[in-house]
Amino acid sequence: ELKRLLSGIVPDEVGLLVSASPVDRRRSFAKWCEKNSDFLLVTDSSAGFDWASLAAEECRGTEVSFGPGVIDLLAARINGNARLFVEEARKLITYCEAPGGVIDERMVDLLVPAFGEGDFFEAAEAFFARDLEWSVHALRRHFFAGYDARSLLSALQNRNRLLIQLKSLVDARSLRISDRGLDKRSFEQSAARYGGIFGSITEKNPMNVFTQNPWYLGKLIGKAPLPNLRSLLDHQIEFRRAFVELHERPNDHEEVVRATILRCLSPGRAA
């Protein structure tokens, strides 16, 4: 409908400014807008924005601070929306109101909903923390909040796909991971060595680990040891199976995803 209305505008008679955030440039409408307008991409998600200064401004006079990595996590969770960042930061500060309190990643996972088309769902965070109880409770909150199953399964697949690539690089001793997260130097060396196999590394691609932000990959890896490669491959098969079941059981989406999580994380399966 919007495309039809825009198509009817005569440029010599009417000037129209359209702004949008976030924008999925893979969608046909976004591609049409780029082709048929003076298109300008101001920023890509949270890249280049000084989130730390914004957080410091909100914390001023509260004796509350953000822990390591939390500001980046919050910016990713709200998909780079500055207004939402401020509102969610104020909420976290209020929750952590004790003098000297530190806002940690778990608070963000529990209190901040995912915004837009990002993949920072609490249920995904819980799954890759390999916490079965948290995953089941987060899944209930996911559906109660009105989110659908496909977006969550897509997030799980996308993350797991990257973990498969990361685990392969680690097993090949090309990539190093420490208590401090992903080793940036070995990541860059791996990209130089294997990047050509994956295609272009200049444009972000969910299929290519070398196009991802190293901070995001470090967050994805977490502090626990990576699961073995067989488990990660089994997870990917289970996610595909779940997508098929969603079509077969259109009224049981929550049950389908819950069963998938149980199969992946139940004792004896999570490794």
Image (cartoon, helix red, strand yellow):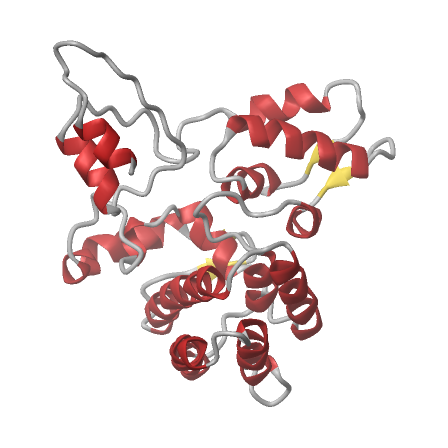
Classify residue 25 as left or right of residue 109: left
Question: Residue at image x 65%, y 23%?
Answer: 56
Residue 164 position, x and y percent, is 37, 70
Q: Closest to the observer: 76 or 229?
A: 76
Q: Quadrant of residue 143?
A: bottom right
Question: Residue at image x 34%, y 72%?
Answer: 168
Q: Closest to the observer: 107 or 100?
A: 107
Q: Closest to the observer: 221 or 136?
A: 136
> Which image quarter is the N terminus in?
top left
Question: Residue at image x 17%, y 29%?
Answer: 7
Classify residue 260 as left or right of residue 1: right
Vertical placement of residue 46 versus 167, above or below: above
Vertical placement of residue 257 versus 268, above or below: above
Classify residue 224 as left or right of residue 226: right
> Which image quarter is the C terminus in?
bottom right
Vertical placement of residue 13 versus 74, above or below: above
Q: Is residue 182 visible?
A: no
Residue 17 position, x and y percent, is 30, 17
